[in-house]
Image (cartoon, rainbow, N blue to C red):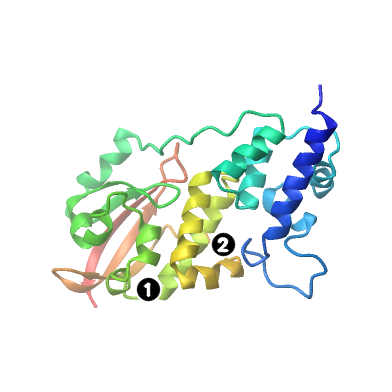
Amino acid sequence: MGKPADQRRELGLFLRSRRERLTPAEAGLPRTSRRRTPGLRREELAVLAGISATWYTYLEQGRDVQASDQVLRALASALALDRPEEDHLFRLAGRAPAGPREAEAVSAEVAAVPALVHPHPAYVVGATYDVLSHNEAARELFEDVLAADEPNFARWTFTDPRARHVVIDWEPEARALLARLRTLASRHPGDERFTRLVDELHEASPQVRSWWPHYEVRAQRPTGRKRLRHPRLGAVDYAYAALHPAEQPDQTLVIYSDARPC
């Protein structure tokens, strides 16, 4: 049986209010010509959430259509809802509030790899750049990152001024990281891990606020070179390899080698 008409109407009004408060820039969309209405257009929101514009219009108009948990999560992410708002969305849609996300896990076999390649710096990061495993050489090279209670390379890159000292070519490296983060986020619509991190980076970093609307996307390069400032060795030009476990393709094992003085 469908939801009562009043509840469907409330759901439509709630979605419209949140759509109209979100600007295209905040949603990462490019600037367009003058807009007649505030916020996002229905078509734009539908694209961001990966759903049909016609179906979304029915939902906002209060028609008797059913939204799955996956669709509701995608809408919550596209609308940048906080957790209470997301829970409210689920209740209006006649579904149980979204449950907590489980912490990302790394297999013991993959977690052991960085220690096996010592003395080369190596670490494993998750989808949102949380550090899941590392060796002592990586701890020495990235001491500021790994000293944090919840080490995260994206957060360190954009919120810790010391990152600009360690990462010699900071701006192109930071832009590439942000583009990869957007690419990963697009694979997990509605995942609050990405929503929280992107919101935090927007609040803390003027560069993120400036670059995010450009809508750059990028995959992780499997190999390359990166210039880093080592606390003991000084400026070093490293070769790196970025590998993805077959069963966890969003996780990345990064190994640095072939260190050359800059």
Could you say which is closer to the camera, residue 19 or residue 68? 19
Q: Which residue is mark 2?
A: 217
Which x, y percent locates residue 149? 27, 49
Which x, y percent locates residue 135? 21, 49
Could you say which is closer to the camera, residue 111 or residue 197? 197
Q: Is residue 241 left or right of residue 146?
A: right
Answer few, some or many: residues within 10 Å of disc 1's Cα (few below 14, many 20 plus, some between 14 and 19).
some
* Amino acid at circle 2: Val
SS under mark 1? helix
Q: Is residue 156 left or right of residue 116?
A: right
Q: Is residue 260 left or right of residue 196?
A: left
The number of callouts visible is 2
SS under mark 2? loop
- Residue 246 vertical placement versus 199 (above, below): above
Q: What is the quadrant of residue 142 in the picture?
A: bottom left
Q: Which residue is mark 1?
A: 170
Answer few, some or many: residues within 10 Å of disc 2's Cα (few below 14, many 20 plus, some between 14 and 19).
some
Give the position of the N terminus as an image quadrant.
top right
Could you say which is closer to the camera, residue 56 or residue 113? 56
How far separated are the C-alphas under marks 2 and 1? 18 Å
* Amino acid at circle 1: Trp
- Residue 25 vertical placement versus 91 (above, below): below
Q: Is residue 77 left or right of residue 241?
A: right
